[in-house]
Image: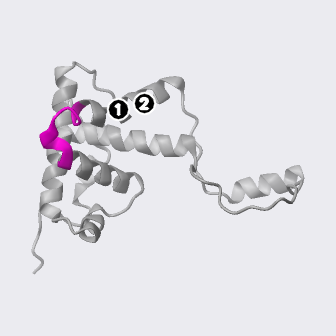
Amino acid sequence: MRKHSRHEDDDDDHLDGAAGRFGDDDTWTPAAAGAALIWALRLARAVAGPTGPRGYGNGMPDVVYTAEEVREMVALTDVPRITATSAMISRMEAVLNWQGRYLAVDPALVGDSRVLKVYLRCRANKVSFAKECKRRGWGRTRSYEQRDRALSAISQGLVRDRVPLFRV
């Protein structure tokens, strides 16, 4: 018989689609804050595209392609392109500032903020948070507790500042 654990490999799926399960009251919850943070990171990645150094290159001129060849190459790429409105970008920027605004002010939440950052990166890139905890030598249960405490602090700050709840 399989023993059920509170934290399975991807037991944090309660944050996925949390926007549809906010409930009747318009109050920020840790799950809603987590869903908004994941949405903002995924939107930032989709809109910005790859960043960083280009890598090795050469001095040869670019190859000139016909319009048909360009259409074929575009059809073969699986990079999702999102057309984001200015309102979406403004909301994304505000959401990405939440960690600095609500977690950096309390020195007791520094470790929780670090764990939340790793968790959000894992969720945005669809990587197992439990495996990342193991790779870093972090206790899984403690990491989930720190993540929950950080999300709770963010949601409490949003409620305190009367930030309106939005659906992502």
Helix, strand or loop: magenta stretch: helix
Considering only vertical position in the picture, is 44 above or below 130? Answer: above
Estimate how packed mark 1 is, as few (under 14), some (14 to 19) or many (20 or more) residues with alpha carbons within 10 Å: few
What label does residue 159 carry, if any?
A: none
Residue that label 1 marks: 97
At 17% from the left edge and 57% from the top edge, which residue is drawn?
143
Q: Are marks 2 and 1 in contact (CB under 8 Å)?
A: yes
Amino acid type, mark 1: Asn
Considering only vertical position in the picture, is 23 above or below 125? Answer: above
In the rendered image, which quarter is residue 99 located in? top left
At 66% from the left edge and 57% from the top edge, which residue is drawn?
77
Q: Which residues are magenta?
A: 102-111
Amino acid type, mark 2: Glu
Residue that label 2 marks: 93
For mark 1, give the secondary structure: loop
Q: Position of residue 135 (x, y in %)?
A: 29, 70
At 47% from the left edge and 41% from the top edge, which residue is drawn?
43
C-alpha gap between disc 2 and disc 1 = 6 Å
Q: Position of residue 122 (x, y in %)?
A: 35, 57
Can I make out residue 41 in this image? yes
In the rendered image, which quarter is residue 125 located in? bottom left
In the rendered image, which quarter is residue 4 located in? bottom left
